[in-house]
Amino acid sequence: MTTAETTSQVKQWTNLAQQLRVDSIRSTTAAGSGHPTSSMSAADLMSVLMLSHLHYDYDDPKNPANDHFILSKGHAAPLLYSMFKAAGAITDEELLTLRKFGSRLAGHPAPELPWVDVATGSLGQGLPISVGIAAVGKYLDKLPYKVWVLLGDSELAEGSNYEAFHLAEHYKLNNLVAILDCNRLGQRGETELGWNMEAYAARARGFGWHDIIIDGHNYEEIDEAYRQAAKVTDRPTLIIAKTIKGKGVSFLADKDGWHGKPLTPEQAEQAIDELKPAARSMVYPVQKPAPAQPAPLGEKKPLELPRYELKSSEATRKAYGDALVALGAANPRVIAMDGEVSNSTYANEFAKAYPDRYFEQYIAEQQMVAFAVGSQVRDMIPFASTFAAFLSRAYDFIRMAAVSQANIRLSGSHAGVSIGEDGPSQMGLEDLAMMRTVYNSTVLYPCDPNQTAQLVAAMADHGGISYIRTTRGKTPVIYGPDETFPIGGSKVVRQSDKDLATVVAAGITLHEALQAYDQLKSEGIRIRVIDAYSVKPIDDETLLAAAEEAGGKIITVEDHWPEGGLGEAVLEAFSQAEVPMPQIVKLAVQSMPSSGKPAELLEAAGISAHDIAQAVRTLVK
Amino acid sequence: MTTAETTSQVKQWTNLAQQLRVDSIRSTTAAGSGHPTSSMSAADLMSVLMLSHLHYDYDDPKNPANDHFILSKGHAAPLLYSMFKAAGAITDEELLTLRKFGSRLAGHPAPELPWVDVATGSLGQGLPISVGIAAVGKYLDKLPYKVWVLLGDSELAEGSNYEAFHLAEHYKLNNLVAILDCNRLGQRGETELGWNMEAYAARARGFGWHDIIIDGHNYEEIDEAYRQAAKVTDRPTLIIAKTIKGKGVSFLADKDGWHGKPLTPEQAEQAIDELKPAARSMVYPVQKPAPAQPAPLGEKKPLELPRYELKSSEATRKAYGDALVALGAANPRVIAMDGEVSNSTYANEFAKAYPDRYFEQYIAEQQMVAFAVGSQVRDMIPFASTFAAFLSRAYDFIRMAAVSQANIRLSGSHAGVSIGEDGPSQMGLEDLAMMRTVYNSTVLYPCDPNQTAQLVAAMADHGGISYIRTTRGKTPVIYGPDETFPIGGSKVVRQSDKDLATVVAAGITLHEALQAYDQLKSEGIRIRVIDAYSVKPIDDETLLAAAEEAGGKIITVEDHWPEGGLGEAVLEAFSQAEVPMPQIVKLAVQSMPSSGKPAELLEAAGISAHDIAQAVRTLVK
C-alpha cells in the first residue's frame, strides 16, 4: 500500500473500531447489564479483522466458502452484535434490544442469530470447537476458509484450551487463527499471567503453534499479524495481542472493578464524547468469500446394517462399531471421533474403514465433544465415543452443545458395574442421569446387537444431542435383524394374560430380567418384561398399559446409581399420565462397587436376576 | 557415594525394580486382567523413588510428615500394589487377590487401602489433586513433605493437567514433583507425541516448570533427577522419563497390542525367566520421614453465623459468603477456593478475611474440585465455588471424588433462569440432577439467607460430597436467624386443615409458591407449601404427611430442567414409601431460555407464581 492508502485504511479501521466501542457501550447501557469493557479491548482487533481479513457474506451465512468467526469470550457479545450492525446485518434498533426478553441478542451469543455458529459463554469452548470446524475445512470440505477465534486471557486457565492446542497442532490446522485479547483483567482482578505476553507465547510454542505477539491497539501490527497467520502452511497461529480493557475511555481503561458493568446513561455520554466516533451507524464494506464449493464427498448409498444371528452373542459396543461402519458406507457425511479408546468402543472399525473421516482425539473428552459440535457446523454427522464414565469429563460441553442447537451423537461404552474387574473409576453409573438432563436429548440403551445397530442408524437421522449407552460384555442376541426399534419405543419381551407384575429393564439388566422371568415362571409367577431401550423419550404408553394389565406393580432395574436414570424416567412417565400411580420398586446400584466378575458385581449391586426375582416375589405376595 | 556404594545401590534398585515387574506380571496373570506392561515401564522409576527418595511410613499412613505418592496413571495399579508388597505393607497372598471380588486391590487404586490418598483411574486427575495436597503442605501444614505423582504420557492429552501446570506454577509448588512415564504407547497405538521428550519439556517450560529429561531405565539418571527436583525452591518439576512399555521382557518391550492385557501363565513364566529376579518376595527398607507436626492452625472458636432480619432481603449467594467467613473464624481447617468468580459467588468475602486459607483457582473448575479433594487428604475442610452451570465442567472430578471417599463442599451460584439477562450459558439448569446422582452426595437448595447460613454450617460437619445451590438475586428473608434446618429436613411454610394440594418448592421457586399461596387464598383455595431445601436426602416423612393430609395432590416446581431434579426426587420419595402415590404435577424449565428479566424468564419457563396458581387450580378443580 502507498502511504496515502495506509492512512486511509487506518482511518477506516479507526472509525469502525470507535463505532464498535460506542455501540458496545450504548447497547449495554440500554440493557442495564453486560460487558462493555471486555468488548472495547478487542474492538481494534475486530475492526481490522472485519474490514480486511474476514471473508464472510452476511447475506448468506450458510455460504460454504465463508470464513468462520467464533467469539470464545462470549461475554463480549456486545462487540459481536456491534460488528453485525456495522456489516448491515442488524439494525441499530435491534442492537438496542440487547439482553431484552424476546430479542435475538442474548447476553451471550447463540445460534438464534444466523451468523453465530455455536453458543459461547462457558469459557474455554470456542477454541476446541474451532478445531472441529477447521479440521472439516482442511480435510473434508477442502475449502480455503479460515476459522478465526477470539479468546479472552482469563479463559486460558481452562484446560480445554490445551486439548485444543494439542489437537490443532496434531492436525496441522493452519486455517485456524486464534486471537488472544490479552487485556490483563479478569472478572475479579488481574489474571494469573497479567500482561506477560511471552508466557502465553511460550505455551503456544510448547504446543507447536506459530505465535505472534502484537500491540492489540496498533492497526498495522494487527493487520500484519493476520497476514502472517494466513501465510503459515503447517500449523495454527496464536496472535497474542496486548490490549487494554475499556480502551479509549479514560475512566474505564485498565481500571479494575468494571468487569461486566454497564455505564450509566451519563457515563455513557461522557465515554462516547471521549471516543469521538466519526460516525454512529455507518455500514462498512465487508469482504465476501470467492465462490467455492466443498469437495465432493461421494454418493449416498442404501444403508446395510450388520446382522447378528439369533441365539449367538455379541457385545453392544461391538455392534456400535459395526453399525458405524455401515453408516459410513451409506452416508459420506458420517464422521467419527474417539478419545483414544477406539479399540474398546469399537470406533476403530470406522477408523479402519474410513480413515479420512475418523478424527482421533486422544484422551481429551472435552475436545472430542467440541470437535463433534464444530463438525456439525459444517453439516457433518458426527459420532463421538469413549467410556460412558468419561463423558462426564465433557458435561459442560454437552450442556453447551444443547444451547448451540447442535446435532451430535455420543456413545458411552463400559456402562455400569457389569464391566467387572476394572472397578468404579471406569464404570459409567451416572451417564443416564447426566444425559437425560440435557435439553432436547435422546437417551438410548440397547441390550442386543441388532437393536444397537438399528438405534445407531436412528441416531444418524435424529436431531439434538443423542446418546447411546453400550455394554462391555457379550450378551445374547434376542432380536432378529429385521426388528425395528423406533426412538421413543420399547419392546414387551415377555407377557401373558396372567402377569402379576412388570419388570422394566434395559441393556444388561434386560438379560437379568429374562433370567428372573424363567425362574419365576417355574414357580408359577408370570411377569411382563419390558425392554425400555429408549430411556428418553420413554414409551409411556406401553408402561401405562403394563401397569393396567399386570397388577399395577412395576419393578425397574438399572445398572446405574438410583438417581436420574431409568427408574426415575419410569416414575416420571406415570406422574405425567393422568392415571393412578402403580406400585414401583426401583433396583439400582446403591453402594460403591469394587472390582470383581460382572456377575458378582451385579449380584452385589442388587440388580441381578436373583434380586429381580426376589423383588417380584416380595411385591406380588 | 563411593563406587562400591553406587554399585551396591544400583544392585538394590535393580533387584527391587525386577521384583516389581515380576509381581506386576504375576498379579495380573492371576487376575486374568489388568495392566502389566504399563506397570513395567515405570518399575525403575518407582524402585529408585521408593528406596531412596520417598519418605513414607507404611505402618503409619496418617503420619503428617509422610510424603504423598499419587499414581495418576491408575491403571498401573499392579505396580503400586507390588510396591506395597515390597514395603511389607501387604503380603504376597494379598497381592494375588488383585481385581478379585472382595479384595482391597481393585483394578484401579482406591482409598480402601490406607496408603492410597485418592482414587485414580480417570486419567488427568492425579496432577490436579497433587496440586491441592502440595499447596496445603507448603502454605498450611508448612511441612517438608513432597508430593510425587506418576503420570502416563497418554494422559497428558487431558486439559486438566494444564490447569494443574498453571496453578502449581502460580503457587510455586516446589514440593511437587511430577514424573512422566513416557512409554510412547497408549491404549490403541502411539501417543501423539511418541518419544518426543523435548515437546513435553517445552510444554512444561511454557508453564514455568522446571523440566528434566532422563532415560527412565537409567538408575543414576533417575536418582539424580529426583535429587535435582528436591533442590528446586521456587517451582514444581516435571521429570520426563523416556521409558519402554513392557521393559525387561523381549516379547512385551515396546510392542503394540499389549495394553491392558495380562500374560497367560506360560507367557508369565517365560517373562519371569527373562527378568531374572534376584528375589521374589523381598521386603525392602524404606525411608521413614523425620518426625514433624503441621504448623499450628489456631484455635477453634464458637460459630457465630450471620443473622438476617426478617422481612429484609438478601441473596442466598451473599449469605453463602457471609457464612463461609463465620465458619472460617470458628474453624481454622475451613479453606475456600473459587474459579475466578469469587465476587459473584461471594467467596471473595472469605478471601478477604482469611487470605492465607483462600486459594484462587482462576477459571479452571476441574483443578478447583481437584484442589478441594487434595486438601481434604490433609484433613482440611474445603469449600469450592463457582457458577452452578460451570460445576458441570468438573463432573468427572466430582464423580471420582466420591470414589475417593472425599469430603468436599461445593457451592453453585447463579442457578436457573432466575439469573436473568446473562442467558442459558450461565444458568445452572442441570446441577441438581448432576449432583443428586453422585454417590453419597448431599444436595441443598436454600431460599433464604438465614437458612443458607445454617446449611453452610451443616456442610462443614458433613461427610461425602455436599452441594449447595444459591440464587443470584435478592430474596426475602422468611426465616428467623435461630431457626434450624437439618440436612434431610424440610419446612412446611404454609398449611391449614383445609389444604387441597401441596406445592413443593425450593430456592427461588419457594418465593413464587408463597405468592401463589396468597393469590389462591384470596380465591378461597388453601394449599400447603413445603420448602424442600434438602433435595437429597429429601424429607420423605413431611411429603408423605402432606399427601395424606392435603388431598393427595402435589405440585413440584423447580428452576431446573425437568429431569433428575426436585420433581424426580419427590417422585422417588413416594415410590420408595409403601403408600398410594399421590397425583403429582411437575413444573420445571421445559424449553431453552434466553435473556430477559428474572420475572419474565420465570414466567416464560412456566414456574412463576402465576403458573403455580394455575396448576393448583387445574389440579383441585
Image: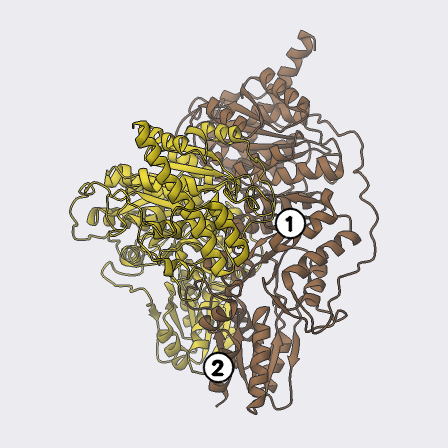
Chain colours: A yellow, B brown
Above-or-below relation of A475 to B95? below
> In this rendering, which labeled residue sits more in front, label 2 or label 1?
2
Query: Residue A264, located in which quarter of the rendered image?
Result: bottom right
Tag 1 residue: B406
Q: Position of residue B353 (x, y in %)?
A: 74, 49
* Front residue (pair B575, B454): B454
Residue depicted at x 54% and y 57%: A266
In what element is the residue under mark 1?
A: loop
- Image spot of residue B12 (x, y percent): 64, 19
User: Percent x, y for residue A18?
Assistant: 42, 45
CA distance for labels 2 and 1:
41 Å
| Secondary structure of residue under mark 2 | helix
Q: Looking at the image, is mark 2 or mark 1 earlier in the sequence?
A: 1
User: Are the residues at dot 2 and dot 1 in contact (C-beta closer than 8 Å)?
Assistant: no
Q: Position of residue A329 (x, y in %)?
A: 21, 46
Q: Which label sits on residue B144?
A: none
The residue type indicated by label 1 comes to Ala
Q: Which residue is mark 2?
A: B615
Three-letter amino acid code of the residue under disc 2: Ala
